Image: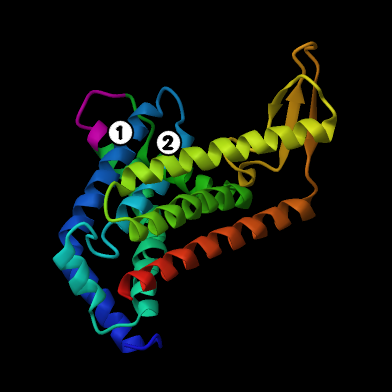
């Protein structure tokens, strides 16, 4: 099988993927829906936005476990590799389910279960809820007023976790989850440590507590700050818009390369 792309073979592969994994997909969406409802109940005490982002990212990783068969099962993985479809078609099938189909379905599922289904469940118990029309208005207002920069942060977080997980899942046959967690922690630790050293030298602070750009990676925040241990005063720096845009483009390029790496690893498995 050459590495050309054929749209008919691609859609046959997409249909085959659904036929073989539809029960797993439905079970996964059930778990996601319940998780969204549980987080919504907790939001009555504290809005867990970071937990919603983590749920979104790790759900995309969980979906990746169905995209390229079960590598630990020699017969299943061998049968998948021998399918009469090119590596490009198999990889694009994975991206179709993992990104282009997953993201819109997740968004629709998120708003339905976070606001509508959760509201109906709460109605079963004595409550003093605001009118349902006010809930719908709040949903529309949240969609309209969410800054584009926030959407980019969430999307880049998703690409960061899924691209790394997909590469690891294709590369290794066993312990993919453990290797993924170790890799993520190592990347974040080394990156933030290096950024801490860079920012310390940049602002010429010999001893101080550094908050590097963002919680995890630079696409989380367009600024950084520091505070010295010897003083309560702090200093804050903001990136100009051009640098912020360039920063996003660089991260998109990094994740694009990571996805290509997953594609090359898939080709190596077939050779």
Rendered view: 185 above or below 112: above
Callout count: 2
Q: Residue 38 — which label?
A: 1
Q: Which residues are magenta?
A: 121-127
In what quadrant of the picture does the N terminus appear? Answer: bottom left
- Residue 73: image x %, image y %? 17, 60
**Where, by quadrant of the figure, is residue 242 drawn?**
bottom right
Decide whether the magenta segment is chiefly helix, strand or loop: loop
- Residue 210: image x %, image y %? 70, 27
Rendered view: 9 above or below 139: below
**Residue matched to label 2:** 51
Quick one: label 1 or label 2, which is nearer the N terminus? 1
Queried whether the magenta region covers residue 220, the answer comes back as no
Which residue is drawn at the image coordinates 38% and 54% (left, top)? Answer: 168
What element does badge 1 sit on?
helix
Which residue is drawn at the image coordinates 30% and 33% (left, top)? Answer: 38
Task: Bin the neighbour count of mark 1 within 10 Å (Cα to Cα): few under 14, some 14-19, many 20 and up.
Answer: some
Left or right for 217, reference 103: right
Q: Residue 115 — which label?
A: none
Task: Bin the neighbour count of mark 2 within 10 Å (Cα to Cα): few under 14, some 14-19, many 20 and up.
Answer: few
């Amino acid at each position: 099988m050459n590495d050309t792309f054929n749209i008919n073979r691609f859609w046959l592969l997409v249909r085959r993927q659904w036929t073989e994994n539809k029960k797993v997909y439905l079970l996964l969406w059930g778990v996601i829906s319940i998780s969204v409802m549980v987080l919504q109940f907790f939001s009555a005490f504290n809005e867990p936005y970071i937990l919603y982002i983590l749920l979104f990212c790790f759900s995309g990783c969980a979906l990746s476990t169905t995209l390229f068969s079960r590598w630990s099962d020699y017969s299943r993985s061998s049968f998948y590799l021998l399918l009469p479809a090119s590596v490009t078609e198999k990889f694009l099938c994975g991206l179709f389910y993992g990104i282009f189909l997953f993201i819109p379905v997740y968004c629709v599922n998120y708003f339905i279960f976070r606001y509508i289904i959760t509201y109906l469940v709460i109605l079963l118990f004595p409550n003093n809820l605001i009118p349902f029309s006010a809930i719908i208005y709040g949903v529309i207002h949240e969609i309209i007023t969410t800054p584009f920069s926030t959407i980019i942060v969430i999307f880049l977080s998703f690409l960061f976790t899924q691209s790394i997980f997909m590469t690891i899942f294709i590369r290794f046959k066993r312990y993919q989850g453990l290797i993924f967690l170790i890799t993520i922690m190592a990347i974040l630790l080394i990156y933030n440590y290096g950024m801490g050293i860079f920012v310390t030298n940049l602002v010429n602070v010999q001893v101080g507590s550094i908050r590097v750009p963002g919680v995890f990676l630079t696409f989380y925040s367009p600024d950084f700050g520091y505070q010295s241990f010897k003083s309560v005063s702090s200093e804050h720096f903001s990136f100009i818009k051009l640098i912020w845009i360039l920063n996003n483009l660089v991260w998109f390029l990094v994740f694009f390369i990571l996805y290509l790496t997953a594609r090359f690893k898939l080709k190596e498995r077939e050779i």
